[in-house]
Image (tube, helix red, strand yellow):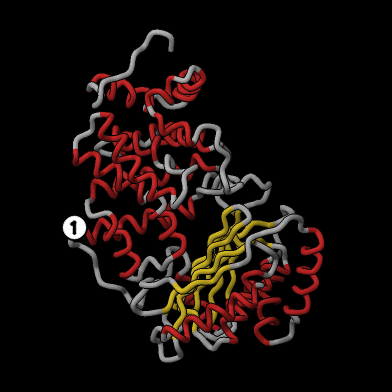
Amino acid sequence: AATAGPLPVPWPDEAREALVTLLGAGPPTVEVWEALEAEGIISRLLPEWEHVRCRPQRNAVHRWTVDRHLIETAVRAAALARDVDRPDLLLVAALLHDIGKGRPGDHSVVGEALTRDIAARLGFGPADTETLATLVRHHLLLIDTATRRDLDDPATVRTVTDAVARTDTLELLHALTEADALATGPAAWSAWRASLVAGLVRRAAAALTGDAPGRKRAEPPASGHERLVAEALRTGGVVLELRERPEGEDAPDGTGTVGVELAIALPDRSGVLPATAGVLALHRLTVRAADLRSVGGTLLLRWRVAAEFGSLPEPARLRNDLVRALDGGLDLVGRLAEREAAYARRRRGAHAPPRVTVAAGGSRDATVLEVRAQDAPGLLHRIGRALEEAGVWVRSAHVSTLGANVVDAFYVTRSDGGPLPDDAATAVAQAVEAALT
């Protein structure tokens, strides 16, 4: 700090390689980086670092401040370096992916512009600079798309391939996505999320190489659930399976809850989504993620849930309550209203109001409604009821809970299976928002 002069611009290859070596050292990187930062060396080498230094995160799901998160992401990326062809680009993208935070505007867009300047200063060539800028600009693309969109809809894959046009860049983005999520906190990454992201990457890679199959209208059931679908078809009733998380499958989410997979198959009918969501809320099962799809006239619902108090309800009780709710013998609305009133009395602080929007271009075959709200008991039940009352058909639902916030996407259609007209879609979005307000 006392004797080193400024580096020339662009950096010599030796200096850039030394930075990459430091970033790729794994956990020991943290102590060295913090020592350099304490002496002001990091901000001297990377002036943009001052805007993220010791900056708190806006979302409580983050474990670290912005600067510490960036270094932790590099540490996580170092463990994935052997999985990519250009580990140097992965490590530098990990260091810079949130560099736009602390400035006005979308941090991904701001970060892209900053990354172009930084990459050129570090001595990266035009092609590598473009790759780094793409990784920073789209570092949230895979996780957001995989958890909020229908992976079997061609529009979902196009969202990725329009942004990332090369398979080697897609490979880097996949690794960056995992490293970023792991560095965020235990609630941000799980086997469920990893499988969704991997499935999206496979589809996008196939599309980029010209090997993508067309959309499969009669998609087979998800692996392991064929038996449930067959039983529902045979009996014409509700078939339910509750499975505790296998060892090593999901990381704990930091709340002391137990990860559980709940699979339900039943003949396709109206009211399934609000009824199921309401029953889960009554049994104090918090929905972490969910997927709903139709398989040959049978609805298959897959849920990732957490038991609020660590004990799981009996599957038979869940099934019986679901049957009663579908038949009208269980007063879900009244029961949940009591719980919501008690929750509201305990809740402290102001939260942003819920927001329901129509995702433009989300799908050619359906209208995509995106719901962002503070998580609360019965929230998904209210969304489902509002959609039922609006008279739309829920083709698939993709629920994602991260910390105290939910971002849910619902693919809805008219009764004839087509997407809603613009004015009708806006009206449905407003109705759902009103139901949550």
Residue under the point 57% across and 52% down: 245
Asked if 373 appears above or below 363 in the picture, the reply is above
Q: Is residue 345 visible?
A: yes
Residue 179 visible here: no
Rendered-image quadrant of the N terminus: top left
Please determine whether, in this image, residue 270 is positioned above or below residue 349: below
At 49% from the left and 67% from the top, the residue drawn is: 398
Q: Is residue 80 left or right of residue 164?
A: right
Please give the residue where the numbered disc 1 appears in the rendered image: 209
Mark 1 is surrounded, within 10 Å at the Cα level, by few (under 14), some (14 to 19) or many (20 or more) other residues, namely few
Q: Position of residue 212 (x, y in %)?
A: 23, 64
Provide residue 144's location: percent of width, then percent of height: 44, 57
Q: Which quadrant is home to the C terminus? A: bottom right
128 or 49: nearer the viewer: 49
The residue depicted at 60 percent of the width and 87 percent of the height is 389
Q: Out of 432 and 111, give the one closest to the viewer.
A: 111
- Percent across and percent down for residue 297 are 45, 84
| Count of all numbered marks drawn on residues in the image | 1
Identified at 58% across, 77% down, the residue is 432
For residue 180, above or below residue 334: above
In the figure, is residue 32 to the left or right of 203? right
Residue 353, quarter of picture: bottom right
Residue, far bottom: 416
Amino acid tagged 1: Thr
Circle 1: element type = loop
Q: Quadrant of residue 207?
A: bottom left
The image shows residue 348 at horizontal and vertical percentages of 76, 55
